């Protein structure tokens, strides 16, 4: 303090005080109520297993107790790494013990020690939609029931999807509970095609007099026809078309009428409508808002409406005519096509 001004300036001139300029000091947020989701690294690639991509398997359940044992038997055999698979179920409008059997099977499969690890996680969604649960098989598969039935199933699928899809999921695999047989490599086989939406052919076994009749099951996977386009121009926008019924002859070409499981399983066909027994979808398709309309969208609902919506948005919708997944046989009357062939 006794230095003169000139002495002070001279003294400070010899001091080497560093000057630090940090223009990128991090902004620290300590709030536990704020989260950040990084979706850019989430990809859907043909090498899904190698790249550690997470798969979400979704199954709506209603009065499904009789099928769950077989369902989990096939699920457990899937060769895709189980630690990369999350399971999601929606249980609703049941009059049997679906929920109890589901819990029992999940407890067994998640706690069983073996050569395959348990699935990464399981989510069960309980939701009743008030759907009529006392319909006979004949009533349930009648033409009049198809519009309301498909809309209700669409709602169930959407509730399940939005309750379970997480940022880390790359693929969504919709798999019905009443599949009786499918390849163990089905996830790897499907993602290898690198399509936005892909379905197999759906057949069933029906045994008559000891003979195995390979029946065609799913008429909801089809290629649009000129006849179908003209028909739609005459329909009320709220009318829901249901395939395989004589009330509306669309003239469409059905995936079940193509292909054979003995031929090249990787042959592809572009589709305009799809069924819901087995669908593999890139998760970003759902994230982009493509869901299962519970209303008439271009005169289709649920999975067929999903395909219509996806194609409108520019996504790829394909089927594999020679890749067959086997469904249970049903008690419904054969020949809903009114004498027409399924191709």
Image (cartoon, rainbow, N blue to C red):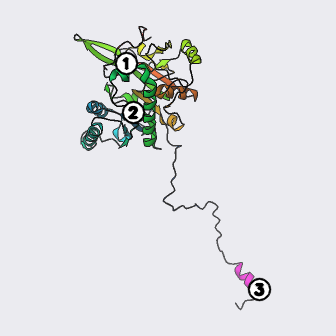
Q: Which one is in front in this view, the residue at disc 1 or the one at disc 3?
A: 1
* Horizontal side of residue 42 vs 78, given as left or right: right
User: Separation of disc 2 and disc 1 at Cα?
Assistant: 24 Å
Q: Label 3: which residue?
A: 5
Q: Which residues are magenta?
A: 2-19
- Residue occupying image coordinates x 74% and y 86%: 7
Residue 112 placement (x, y as % from top left): 24, 42
SS class of the residue under badge 2? loop
- Looking at the image, do the residues carrying marks 2 and 1 touch, with CB atoms under 8 Å apart? no
Q: Is residue 147 visible?
A: yes
Q: Residue furthest top?
A: 339
User: How many C-alpha atoms fall within 10 Å of the one at disc 1: few (<14), some, or many (≥20)?
Assistant: many
Q: In terms of depth relative to the viewer, which is nearer, 168 or 307?
A: 307
SS class of the residue under badge 1? loop
Q: Quadrant of residue 153?
A: top left
* Horizontal side of residue 113 vs 286, given as left or right: left
Residue 136 placement (x, y as % from top left): 33, 24
User: Separation of disc 1 and disc 3 at Cα?
Assistant: 99 Å
Q: Label 2: which residue?
A: 131
SS class of the residue under badge 3? helix
Residue 121 placement (x, y as % from top left): 35, 44
Q: Which one is in front in this view, the residue at disc 2 or the one at disc 1?
A: 2
What number is the disc on residue 66? none
User: How many C-alpha atoms fall within 10 Å of the one at disc 2: few (<14), some, or many (≥20)?
Assistant: some
Question: Where 127 falls versus 177 (above or below)?
Answer: below
* Quadrant including the N terminus: bottom right
| Residue 17 is one of the magenta-drawn residues | yes
Q: Quadrant of residue 213?
A: top left
- Residue occupying image coordinates x 36% and y 22%: 139
For marks 1 and 3, the one nearer the N-term is 3
User: Separation of disc 3 and disc 2 at Cα?
Assistant: 93 Å
């Amino acid at each position: 303090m006794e230095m003169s001004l000139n002495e002070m300036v001279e003294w400070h001139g010899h001091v080497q005080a560093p000057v630090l300029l940090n223009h990128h000091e991090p902004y620290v947020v300590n709030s536990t109520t704020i989260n950040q989701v990084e979706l850019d690294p989430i990809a859907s690639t043909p090498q899904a297993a190698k790249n550690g991509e997470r798969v979400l398997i979704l199954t709506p359940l209603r009065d499904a107790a009789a099928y769950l044992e077989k369902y989990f038997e096939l699920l457990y055999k899937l060769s895709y790494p189980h630690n990369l698979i999350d399971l999601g179920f929606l249980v609703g409008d049941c009059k049997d013990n679906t929920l109890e059997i589901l819990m029992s099977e999940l407890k067994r499969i998640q706690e069983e020690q073996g050569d395959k690890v348990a699935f990464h996680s399981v989510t069960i969604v309980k939701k009743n939609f008030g759907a009529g649960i006392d319909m006979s098989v004949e009533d349930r598969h009648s033409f009049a029931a198809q519009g309301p039935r498909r809309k209700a199933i669409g709602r169930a699928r959407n509730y399940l999807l939005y309750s379970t899809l997480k940022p880390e999921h790359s693929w969504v695999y919709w798999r019905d509970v009443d599949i009786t047989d499918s390849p163990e490599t089905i996830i790897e086989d499907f993602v290898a095609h690198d399509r936005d939406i892909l379905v197999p052919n759906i057949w069933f076994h029906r045994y008559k007099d000891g003979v195995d009749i390979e029946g065609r099951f799913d008429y909801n996977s089809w290629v649009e026809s000129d006849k179908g386009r003209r028909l739609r121009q005459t329909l009320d926008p709220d009318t829901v078309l249901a395939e395989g019924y004589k009330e509306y002859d669309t003239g469409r070409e059905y995936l079940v009428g193509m292909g054979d499981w003995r031929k090249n399983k990787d042959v592809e066909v572009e589709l305009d409508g799809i069924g819901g027994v087995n669908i593999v979808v890139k998760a970003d398709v759902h994230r982009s808002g493509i869901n299962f309309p519970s209303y008439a969208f271009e005169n289709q609902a649920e999975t067929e409406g999903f395909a219509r919506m996806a194609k409108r948005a520019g996504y790829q919708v394909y089927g594999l005519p020679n890749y067959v997944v086997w469904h249970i046989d049903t008690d419904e009357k054969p020949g809903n096509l009114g004498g027409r062939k399924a191709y």
